[in-house]
Amino acid sequence: EIVLTQSPATLSLSPGERATLSCRASQSVSSYLAWYQQKPGQAPRLLIYDASNRATGIPARFSGSGSGTDFTLTISSLEPEDFAVYYCQQRSNWPPSTFGQGTKLEIK
Amino acid sequence: EVQLVESGGGLVQPGGSLRLSCAASGFTFSSYWMSWVRQAPGKGLEWVANIKQDGSEKYYVDSVKGRFTISRDNAKNSLYLQMNSLRAEDTAVYYCAREGIVATSPWGQGTMVTVSS
């Protein structure tokens, strides 16, 4: 089973700052990695697929990069609505898929 | 609009059973793999099970094998999860989700399952 490790567990930043979230896979997943955003009381929402492609309707301030085992989600300038929990998911060894443990992005 | 609506959650005693349902609309249900994903209170996401378009392939996380059964009725655009021998550690919000080629999306709003005496 491919294990995904996200870091940091919690990231404290202010609106307008740049956020950089990391996801590391225990073995190569090529570019088959997705990112999701989850706000309290809501279902996860797809942000990025295939490591770097924004899903429909996702603002350009969200970007993804990486391949193999190391991936990054970057939010260029944080808006108040961006404070949430972010999960990565591998789609290489599918089914099943696996998720990282999440990074909580909180307001500083 | 693509929509997934779960139902069937509730409070059940340890060892009991529950059947979750997911009603799909706005897309050709029979063309997609479908999944159940759960989230224990305050915890992360855990994939539980998924099923191929025609129901011929099914996969489960090890912790539910032999206890949970995923199924679907393409004529009714519905996905199901039969949960037997429930344990306290099965307590979670259960999400129904569509599996696309590149990602899991969209997700339903979830249904809460609480296993407690």
Image (tube, coloured by chain):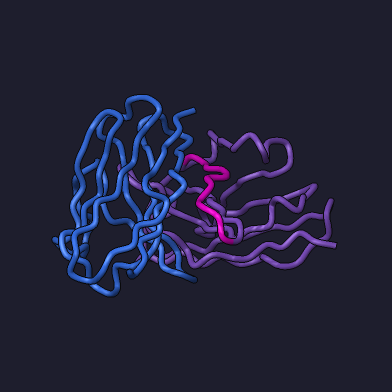
Chain colours: A blue, B purple
Residue B55 sits in which quadrant? top right
Say above or below: B51 vs B108.
above
Say which residue appears at 46% left-offset and 70% top-offset.
A40
Q: Is residue A22 left or right of residue A102?
A: left
Q: Position of residue B59 (x, y in %)?
A: 56, 35
* Outermost residue to the bottom: A80
Q: Is residue B95 left or right of residue B83?
A: left
Q: Nearer the viewer, residue A64 or A32?
A: A64
Say which residue appears at 59% left-offset and 37% top-offset.
B60
Q: Position of residue B42 (x, y in %)?
A: 56, 60
Say which residue appears at 25% left-offset and 69% top-offset.
A14
Say which residue appears at 48% left-offset and 35% top-offset.
A96
Q: Nearer the viewer, residue B3 or A84?
A: A84
Q: Position of residue B18 (x, y in %)?
A: 74, 58
Residue B25 sits in which quadrant? bottom left
Q: Main secondary structure of the magenta part?
A: strand
Q: Position of residue A12 (x, y in %)?
A: 33, 62
Total marks placed: 0
Q: Is residue B117 left or right of residue B92?
A: right
* Outermost residue to the top: A27
Question: Which quadrant of the rendered structure holds the C terminus of chain A?
Answer: bottom left
Q: Nearer the viewer, residue A4 or B73?
A: A4
**Range of the magenta residues?**
B42-52
Q: Is residue B94 left or right of residue A24?
A: right
Q: Is residue A14 magenta?
A: no
Say above or below: A18 vs A68.
below
Q: Is residue B47 magenta?
A: yes
